[in-house]
Image (cartoon, helix red, strand yellow):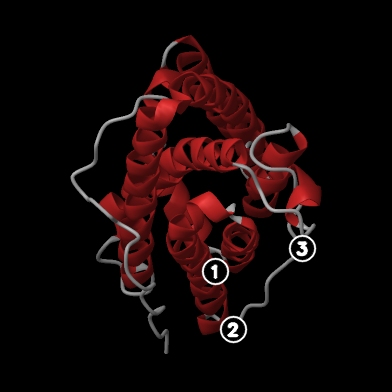
Amino acid sequence: MLSAKSLFQEILDDDESFRLFCSIAASGESQGGWENARIAALVPASERALAPKITRHGADEDKHGRIFNALLKKRGLEPVEVPPDTDYTMLLERHGIGLAHEKLKGDEPLTVPDIVTYLAHSRVTEQRASEQMDLLRRHFADHPDLGRAVRMISNDEDNHLAYCHEELLRFAREGHGRAIQRTLRECALAEIRVYRDVSLAVMDHMGRILGWSRPKVAVLAAGIRAVYAYERLNGWRRMVSLTMPERRDALGGPATAAPEFA
């Protein structure tokens, strides 16, 4: 029977599929770390108090990239080049979601609307990350190799999501509510399309590595498209709601260190 746990177990048990999985994850996390570091450096003067939290966000993402690379090293594996069709972060950027990398590479300070855009984009993508890591935590929290990594990253993603909710609600109180809701909707509808396309691409690459049969690939592809249909109809709304989180000031302290993997 196909299940999220059995599929990931297949990927985990094979060196080449695990190598691709960790390489994709490490690349995306490292890219997120760079983006947050640049945003922190370019925060407008009126929002300098937010810079340490953005820095912490980026440090967490960098840490996650190091964790995935450490998991590869523990198995004696080297990262592989990430196929372009599986590069979630770059595909979102190409669809105009978030802040353009050309802007982040410059020296011009960002504006408050830019920070609102960054937070709205993060609120959507961190929802996805939190859900994915929660799934892995439910199935692999006690795994001898992955357990510590899964628990730490899942906790960090929950912190990131809480931070986005809290800061966006602050900006909404300051009069940016309509812009926030418009940006959240645009980001959510674009993200679910990119997530569908990346999921299909990852499945295709994993299927070739693991020798999946055509019927199995067809069932998995149908499942991915069914999730997209649900998200396009109504599921995207979970990505645009804002509620005050139980975790307040979730990024108010320094980033925690990555665990050692002997």
Percent across and percent down for residue 89 are 65, 47
Q: Secondary structure at mark 1?
A: helix
Percent across and percent down for residue 71 are 50, 75
Of labels 3 and 1, earlier in sequence is 1
Say which amino acid is labelled 2: Gly
Q: Are marks 3 and 1 in contact (CB under 8 Å)?
A: no
Q: Are marks 1 and 2 in contact (CB under 8 Å)?
A: no
Q: Is 183 drawn above or below residue 149 in the view shown?
A: above
Q: Is residue 28 left or right of residue 150?
A: right
| Residue 239 visible to the viewer | no
Query: Which residue is farthest front?
Result: 46
| Residue hosting label 3 | 81
Q: Residue at x 61, y 59 (%)?
A: 17
Q: Secondary structure at mark 3?
A: loop
Percent across and percent down for residue 67 are 49, 73
Give 237 or 219, whichever is nearer the viewer.
Answer: 237
Of labels 1 and 2, earlier in sequence is 1
Quadrant of the drawing holding the C terminus: bottom left
Report the Cα–Cα distance between label 3 and label 1: 18 Å
| Mark identifier at residue 76 | 2
| Residue hosting label 1 | 62
